[in-house]
Image (spheres, rainbow, N blue to C red):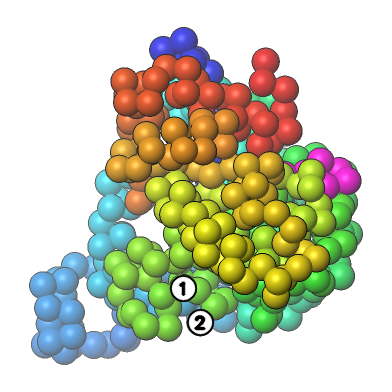
Amino acid sequence: MRNGMRIMDVDRHVMEPIGMWREYLPVTMRDQAPQLMSVAPFGETLASRLERLGEHALLRTPDVLGVAGKPLMRDVTEVAYIETGLIAARRRPLLSAAETPQGQLAEMEATGVDVAVMLPTFAPFLVYDDSIGAELSRAYARAYNRWLVDMCSFAPTKLVGAALLSRHDPGAMVQDLEQALRDGLRAVVLRPNPVCGRTLGDAAYHPFFAACEHNSVTVLLHEGTHTRVPTAGADRFASHFAQHACSHPMEMMMALLALIEGGILERYASLRVGFLEAGCGWLPYWLWRLDAIEYAQLSAEVRGRVVRRPSEYFQRQCWIAMEPTEAMLDHVALELGPSRIVFGTDFPHLDHAADIVDEALAQDARIGTEALRTILWSSPSSLMGLAPD
């Protein structure tokens, strides 16, 4: 507890040790375990490197994770690898802490986080790859989930595991969900992107969402730039700078639309969905547009599966994660109410400040102490289906 407030971090990441893949994958698939690989051209001359990379030429290109000579992340420039490698070097202790339950708990204690929902880092790049088959995608997800169960069992009241599920074979998702629940995981995390040509609103996912509703399982959506599935911005920008700017908010906007337009939120009225790491400032505009323009003028096209204003669906069963310093936070808290806003640190990832909990606590003067208390504890408790006290 910090400043008299309990804190639930709904977006905290593990860093999967490389060695765990060979340990948890089936023996027959261990040749598909990721390994470190070089992305720098072999034997390149300094002159060529200078011409190609300019001021970055004298900096080492870090090795990256890959499978069979293919990097996990798609279309990352070598300069981006160098820049992120420099940031990672400065945050090495935090990245290492995220590999173990002891490290996670020590960092939670130091920053005042009481309960954390544990999400993956590398595993989604393996699972969400349109170029591989369903069997391998599911094997990656299962291996990760088994490892996560072991991690969270160290402190099950503090570390809440979210199962990563493959979407390659919608017909197998209920089976995979039930296995994860038997193992002790208490939520699921999915990419918001289309996978194998299906958006989240596709009718093929109805049995899965029905099972989530029946079992009171929270669905968390979390984007990741450079995944090998269709991603907003990837078709028109080459830089990590631009792709990262587009992918997180724009994929979340379209995921919310897919769940509404496809009738998922109408059909499964008790389903709980969290939209993570995309900020919340876009949401009032998006809901206004969907309400005042699309639903008001074009709802006849989707009659039967969209029977109320999109904002009503969101207020009934959706939550969104805020960024403490984003410009529109106070407006969103006023417009939507703090009970639909949650907080996540994104620990230990490089694109969020290490003192993000301090940044969040500093917002009490901006949005009010009670609103902040709701965002940090009671609202995420509702999202996760947990008793707030």
Percent position of residue 35, x then y: 53, 69
Alpha carbon distance from label 1 to label 2: 25 Å
For mark 1, what is the residue? 232
Percent position of residue 253, x then y: 52, 61
Q: Residue at x 52, y 32 (%)?
A: 337
Secondary structure at badge 1 equals loop
Q: Which residues are magenta?
A: 212-218
* Mark earlier in primary sequence (1, 2): 2
Task: Say which quadrant the C terminus sits in.
Answer: top right
Q: Residues within 10 Å of mark 1 (few under 14, many from 20)?
A: many
Q: Which mark is residue 290?
A: none
Percent position of residue 347, x then y: 45, 41
Residue 342 visible at all: no
Q: Look at the image and say whether residue 153 sits in the magenta stretch.
A: no
Q: Are marks 1 and 2 in contact (CB under 8 Å)?
A: no
Q: Which mark is residue 69?
A: 2
Q: Is residue 272 left or right of residue 184?
A: left
Q: Is residue 124 left or right of residue 303?
A: left
Name the front one of labels 1 and 2.
1
Q: Amino acid at mark 2?
A: Gly
Residue 150 visible at all: yes
Percent position of residue 226, x then y: 46, 71
**Rendered position, 177 above or below 6:** below
